[in-house]
Image (cartoon, grey):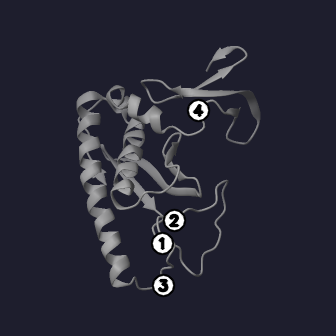
Amino acid sequence: FALRPATDMRALPTLSLAASLAVCRAIETVAAPAGLAVKWPNDVLAHAGKLSGISLEALAGGVCIGVGINVFPRRDVTEVPGKYRLAYLFDDEAADDLSAAQRAIATQLLGALLTEMDAYYRRWQDEGFAGLIGEYEQRLAFVGSSCALETIDGTPLETGTIRGVDTRGRLLVETPSGIV
């Protein structure tokens, strides 16, 4: 999606959180995966593993949102690097060319994603992330779970328990020294 939000650019990071809600709703329109949840800030997980990833990049006064959803497994892809195994909406394998039934499902999912993204984008622009925080926290994975905060190179900083997110979309972690 290429968007030009009419909002304070400091709020832009929360757009990826809004996009994760749109992806969840679109997926639920087409399938009912078990344990659908958002891993902060914007990966969509099912009990089986990572179902979707979302990326945001600011470009020339706008923002580009990339969404990947694992709909069908491919015969030639069994694992990818990362912490989570892959999850798929459907079990039937995809060949180089999708079957008519698979194509219909992909088309239905794309339509649902366009509809939901439009709705969540409008809400995000009108209400900011504060208007979505309740729904986001209902879908937030790992609330109450222990976590480790570390720098980008893996240096440990602190450990704590995931408690939720704030109105700016930041993950709230309770540590011995308080909420960070």
Mark 2 and mark 1 lie on one chain; the one further toward the N terminus is: 1
Say whether marks 2 and 1 touch (CB < 8 Å): yes
Residue that badge 4 annotates = 143
The kind of secondary structure element at disc 3 is loop
Left or right side of 131 for 153: right
Q: Amino acid at mark 2?
A: Tyr
What crowding class fits label 4: few (fewer than 14 Cα within 10 Å), some (14-19), or many (20 or more)?
some
Kindly identify which numbered label has been placed on residue 88: 2
Q: Quadrant of the N terminus?
A: bottom left
Q: Amino acid at mark 4?
A: Val
| Residue 109 versus residue 24 in the image, above or below | below
Residue that badge 3 annotates = 95
Q: Tell me the residue at 57%/81% (across/down).
A: 75
Q: Tell me the residue at 35%/47% (across/down).
A: 22
Mark 1 and mark 4 lie on one chain; the one further toward the N terminus is: 1
Of badges 3 and 2, the one in the foreground is 2
Kindly identify which numbered label has been placed on residue 72: 1
> What is the distance, in whole Å, between disc 1 and disc 4 at their CAs?
29 Å
Say whether marks 1 and 4 touch (CB < 8 Å): no
